[in-house]
Image: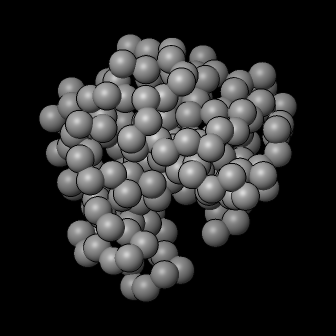
Amino acid sequence: MDIKDAIQLITHPEFSTQSKKVWIDLGCGTGTFTLALASILEEESTIYAFDLNGSALKQIPFTYKKVNIEKLVIDFISTDLPIHQINGVLMANSLNYVKDKEGFLKNLKSHLTKDACFLITEYDSDASNTWVPYPINFQSLKELFSKSGYKNITKLNSRPSVYGNRQMYAALIEP
């Protein structure tokens, strides 16, 4: 998937990034969705891009479309995050690596502002494999975030995956 495709997946009339200036991208890889998010954020926003792979992080620029990108090599699942007062969380195909999703969200909540949102992309499937160990389809995502106290869970868009016969979806989760 390229940046243009990623932008199309996460863009929706109901999704506004206005006044959401501090974001984290958990499991950002080489930054396709990091840059897609930067393309729709207000200028002078900041994205903290976290990944275990330092080589992948090196492929992400420090600024994109006048958005600052801070890169950190970190295991976002087992490490307490060094950032607080976060307005938005991007997880593009990375929530499927989290086994204890409820516990993860509970720990993450202490880092977020009261009005923080989540932008999630995942495969709309329950079938695990080597690359998607703990999958979460959209219905399961809705149930997970509802249990965690979120009221507005919207599927923004979906598209066929290039891997196998599956759909990918983007979802916006707000308090």
Q: Looking at the picture, how far across and down is residue 76, in whole percent? A: 46, 41
Report whether 171 appears left or right of 100: right
Quarter of the image with the N terminus in it = bottom right
Viewer-side residue, 112 vs 103: 103
Task: Say if residue 108 shows up in the picture.
Answer: yes
Report whether 97 appears left or right of 4: left
Q: Looking at the picture, how far across and down is residue 19, in whole percent? A: 60, 17
Residue at 57% across / 51% down in the picture?
A: 52
Residue at 48% across / 75% down in the picture?
A: 161
Quarter of the image with the C terminus in it = top left
Q: Looking at the picture, how far across and down is residue 10, in whole percent? A: 55, 49
Task: Say if residue 152 shows up in the picture.
Answer: no
Q: How is the image coloured?
A: one colour
Furthest toward the bottom, the residue is: 164
Image quadrant in which you'd find residue 79: top left
Compared with residue 8, is residue 119 higher up or lower down, i.e. above or below?
Answer: above
Residue at 30% across / 34% down in the picture?
A: 105
Compared with residue 121, is residue 133 higher up or lower down, i.e. above or below?
Answer: below
Residue at 74% across / 35% down in the picture?
A: 69
Viewer-side residue, 128 vs 8: 128
